[in-house]
Image: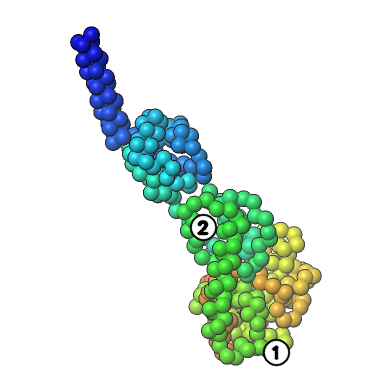
Amino acid sequence: MKRNFIALTLFVLLCCFGLLFAARYTLNHPGPLLKEKIIYISPGTPLRNIAQTLSQEDVISSPWIFCLYTIFKGESSNLKAGDYKFHSGISLQQVIQKLIMGDLVTYSITVPEGAQSQDVLKIMRKSPALIPPLTRPLQDGALWPSTYHVRNRTSYDVMVTRMEVTAQKNHKILWQGRAPELSPFTFQQALILASIVQKEAGSLSEMPLVASVFLNRLKKGIPLQADPTVQYAIEKDKGPLKRSLLRKDLLYPSPYNTYQNSGLPPGPICNPGKAAIQSVLHPQSSPFYYFVANGTGGHTFAKTYAEHLRNVKVWQQRRK
């Protein structure tokens, strides 16, 4: 009996040592993953389900060792939810450490200057970090163009609120530093004009001059006659305009059409960036009332209509 007990004890010890060796080997040995993979762990997922998901995705080879080791470390309730990027051959211990530390994937969502709200929605739809739907309308001019970093999945509504709050903060700072001669303007009016400048200017350096033309025209009561406002008016009613503007389009009936209406349109036509807003809030003095494309990405400016017509002819010849 004693010999049998000793033999059984030795056998159990050998099994335990074998299991410990196998577990240690599995923990530190390169795992089965052959190609980098991103896996989402949803909030509230039980430890067993996390292990099963990682095993099914070939990230780990032993779900039970994953569970036992995590429980042994006292970390079973500390695994973070979110998107994780696992590299090929990642060991089981490295996987567990990632989940404990919350080493999540960082997604970048870039809203370019001049993007319209419908463009922003398309950008958000392409990001795996954002969860639809959007439950409220997007307003042009209310979002701040920038690159936003997201380390965990969030809703469209939360993302839009973040863009709006950033815009409000930056708009306030820019408005407080405005030039004194803008006193007749409200910030909303400046924002509307900045959105037109954003769409019209060929470069950042050209924005102050483009803004000066529009400001000069507003002071004289001359219609702005900005093509982007016409395109915005048509697309607002009918969807994307998949062609260039035609002469007949300039007659399109809309309060946004600055060929048919004097002054500013009722709202911004895009989400302008800092440079465009500053070009309006710190206006450059110029004698110009007209401009036309020069064929190289910029514009040629003119003081008089006669001079402007000559510039238009030059542009038409270059196009031919």
Classify residue 64 by image quadrant: top left
| Residue type of the residue flagged with mark 2 | Ile
Residue 33 position, x and y percent, is 38, 35
Look at the picture and state if 7 lies above or below 33: above
Left or right: 201 in relation to 236: left
Residue 237 position, x and y percent, is 75, 62
User: For numbered disc 2, what is the local secondary structure?
Assistant: strand
Residue at 79% of width from left, 70% of height from top? 253
How many discs mark residues in the rendered view? Answer: 2
Residue at 71% of width from left, 75% of height from top? 265
Residue at 45% of width from left, 46% of height from top? 80
User: For numbered disc 1, what is the local secondary structure?
Assistant: helix
| Residue type of the residue flagged with mark 1 | Lys
Residue under circle 1?
A: 220
Residue at 38% of width from left, 37% of height from top? 71
Of circles 1 and 2, the one toward us is 2
Residue under circle 2?
A: 109
Classify residue 317 by image quadrant: bottom right
Mark 1 or mark 2: name the one nearer the start of the chain. Answer: 2
Residue 147 position, x and y percent, is 49, 62
Classify residue 139 by image quadrant: bottom right
Q: Are marks 1 and 2 in contact (CB under 8 Å)?
A: no
Left or right: 65 in relation to 50: left
